[in-house]
Image (cartoon, helix red, strand yellow):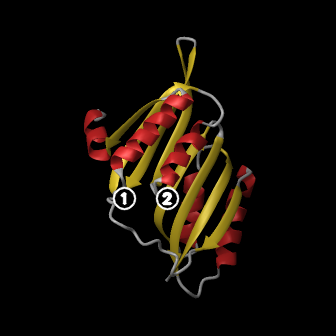
């Protein structure tokens, strides 16, 4: 079996996931992972699928493109390298939330601190919210912190960057975050 990643991007509308997943199934692919989001009016999804070694990626790509062309969507397919799996080192899952006035450079500022400490971002959601005539920018980072990190130095750097950007920054272990935010 080989694996492919299929990227779909374009204007949001109902039925995109159904059309892509049905077409991949009809092409003999098995979905292993799917992630999709909508940003304002734009849809974006990544599908990871396994397929028989004798199946051609070009045929799968052509089938998906034909299915979603009437929806005005862009489709790209890439084979996953067999040796491309990143070695997972032990890490602890944490959540960073930042809230403050919207301004250019917020995501760049926070992610620079994460990168400089060797911290991997596994998920990021950033949205602008207007409340009582105030515009707040809310970011939620799901991150993996390696065990060898200098935690006090990282936390200080993150707090310093938050202050410089005018953001309130909160760092919590994912389990604590989930317990606090349980509905």
Provide the residue designation for mark 2. 34
Tally the marks.
Answer: 2
**Looking at the image, which is closer to me, 7 or 81?**
81
Q: Earlier in the sequence, mark 1 or mark 2?
A: 2
**Label 2 neighbour load within 10 Å: few <14, some 14-19, many 20+:** some
**Looking at the image, which is closer to me, 132 or 183?**
132
Q: Is label 2 in a helix, a strand or a loop?
A: strand
Report the residue at 54% width, 62% height from top. Answer: 47
Residue that sits furthest to the top in the current view: 132
Q: Quadrant of the C terminus?
A: top left
**Label 1 neighbour load within 10 Å: few <14, some 14-19, many 20+:** some
Q: Quadrant of residue 80?
A: bottom right
Frontmost of labels 1 and 2 is 1
Report the residue at 36% width, 52% height from top. Answer: 150
Q: CA distance from mark 1 to mark 2?
A: 26 Å
In the rendered view, tell whether residue 102 sits above or below residue 18.
above
Report the residue at 51% width, 46% height from top. Answer: 113
Q: Is residue 7 visible?
A: yes
Residue that sits furthest to the bottom in the current view: 54
In the rendered view, tell whether residue 53 sits above or below residue 179.
below
Q: Are marks 1 and 2 in contact (CB under 8 Å)?
A: no
Provide the residue designation for mark 1. 146
In the rendered view, tell whether residue 157 sits above or below residue 85.
above
Q: Position of residue 94 (x, y in %)?
A: 35, 47
Q: Position of residue 101 (x, y in %)?
A: 56, 24
Horizontal side of 61 relative to 180 (left or right) equals: right
Q: Is label 1 in a helix, a strand or a loop?
A: loop
* Mark number displayed over residue 19: none
């Amino acid at each position: 079996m080989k694996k492919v990643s299929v990227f779909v991007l374009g204007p949001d509308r109902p039925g995109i996931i159904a059309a892509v997943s049905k077409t991949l199934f009809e092409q003999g692919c098995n979905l292993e992972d799917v992630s999709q989001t909508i940003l304002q009016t734009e849809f974006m999804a990544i599908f990871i699928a396994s397929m028989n070694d004798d199946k051609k990626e070009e045929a799968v790509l052509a089938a998906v493109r034909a299915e979603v062309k009437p929806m005005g969507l862009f489709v790209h397919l890439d084979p996953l390298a067999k040796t491309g799996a990143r070695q997972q080192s032990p890490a602890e899952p944490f959540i960073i939330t930042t809230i403050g006035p919207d301004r250019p450079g917020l995501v760049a500022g926070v992610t620079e601190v994460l990168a400089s400490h060797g911290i991997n971002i596994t998920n990021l959601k950033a949205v602008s919210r207007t409340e009582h005539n105030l515009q707040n920018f809310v970011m939620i980072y799901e991150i993996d912190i390696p065990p060898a990190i200098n935690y006090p130095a990282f936390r200080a750097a993150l707090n310093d960057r938050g202050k410089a950007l005018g953001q309130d920054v909160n760092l919590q272990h994912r389990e604590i975050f989930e317990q606090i935010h349980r509905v």
